[in-house]
Amino acid sequence: MPQKSASAKDNALGTFLRDRRMRLDPTTFGFPAERRRTPGLRREEVAQRSNISATWYTWLEQGRGGAPSPDVLDRLAAGMMLTEPEREHLFILAFGHPPEARYRQSEGITPRLQRVLDAFPFSPAIIRTATWDVLAWNVAAAAVLTDYSTLPREGRNILRLMFSNERIQAAQDDWRTVARYVVGAFRADAARAGAGAEIAQLVEELSRQSPEFAALWRDNEVVGHGDGVKRLSHHRIGPIELEFSTFAVEGRPDLTMMVYNPATAETADRMKRLIQETTDTEAEFTV
């Protein structure tokens, strides 16, 4: 590969690679803990772990290697055991944009993130995946939306509930409009997270079970799902109006937090009484 004059972008990439390499503990990577002139891994050790030539890696650190391919960056990230934020920063330095999303199936969330949900005592809040599986929820969500703890894990999917659960369908102010919106937002979320295989499996299942879903999916609509208003006919407290907002979970492009707030004072009062009753009932069973 011919050497190229270093640009500011190349220098920034090289500085980042050199900085991360010098922070690495050789013993963690299976190299002997012998006396070294400088801390961290040697350049040839990084090149060996990343399956690239030591000469090219040296040029990259010196800002003379030009822009590596995404495959090479992925090999460097894996070889140096970079975190996901570090891998993303590596791509931004090289190309000016994050890497293509890689979907990871999630089994749960951290206790810290659950405490964030629990910090909303009277606002339903959930964490969902890119394929709209609900991973976590707070007490308010269980009382006002759905008590996901009563459902099997595979049943905690918003699409499955929307198209197969008669109670969920009946609670919507305008089910067909809501269903169209949900399918368009689901398509956008799953594609953004790179969940192609997971989408195909879920879409095939839902299309077999629901002609309505199959028709909406064929329409190919894509919509944003940042915020909006949701109107429900709750089976215990009657009609309620909720404002919802969605938030990305830092470092987890596959997860989204949704928080619902009462849109009117009347809705707030009724929701608060319902949630308090639910909390009191749960306390009775735990005494």
Image: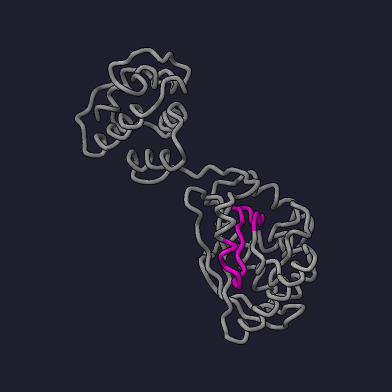
- Residue 46, position as x, y percentages in the image: 39, 22
The magenta region covers 117-136
Look at the picture and state if 271 lies above or below 63.
below
In the picture, measured across the screen, residue 213 lies left or right of residue 256, that is: right
* Residue located at (63% from left, 65% from top): 182
Indicate the quadrant containing the N terminus: top left, top right, bottom left or bottom right: top left
In the picture, measured across the screen, residue 199 lies left or right of residue 283, that is: left
* Residue located at (67% from left, 63% from top): 216
Exactly how many numbered labels are in the figure?
0
Q: Quadrant of residue 42?
A: top left
In the picture, measured across the screen, residue 195 lies left or right of residue 97, that is: right
Q: Nearer the viewer, residue 203 or 54?
A: 54
Q: Quadrant of residue 238?
A: bottom right
- Residue 75, position as x, y percentages in the image: 45, 28
- Residue 22, position as x, y percentages in the image: 33, 27
* Residue located at (50% from left, 61% from top): 247
Residue extending farthest to the front is 287
Look at the picture and state if 237 lies above or below 131.
below
Q: Is residue 28 magenta?
A: no
Residue extending farthest to the bottom is 266
In the picture, measured across the screen, residue 143 lies left or right of residue 13, that is: right
Q: Is residue 134 magenta?
A: yes
What coloring was used for the rendering?
A: one colour
Q: Nearer the viewer, residue 104 or 151?
A: 151
* Residue located at (37% from left, 21% from top): 41
Q: Quadrant of residue 189?
A: bottom right
- Residue 163, position as x, y percentages in the image: 74, 64
Q: Nearer the viewer, residue 284 or 225?
A: 284
Indicate the quadrant containing the C terminus: top left, top right, bottom left or bottom right: bottom right
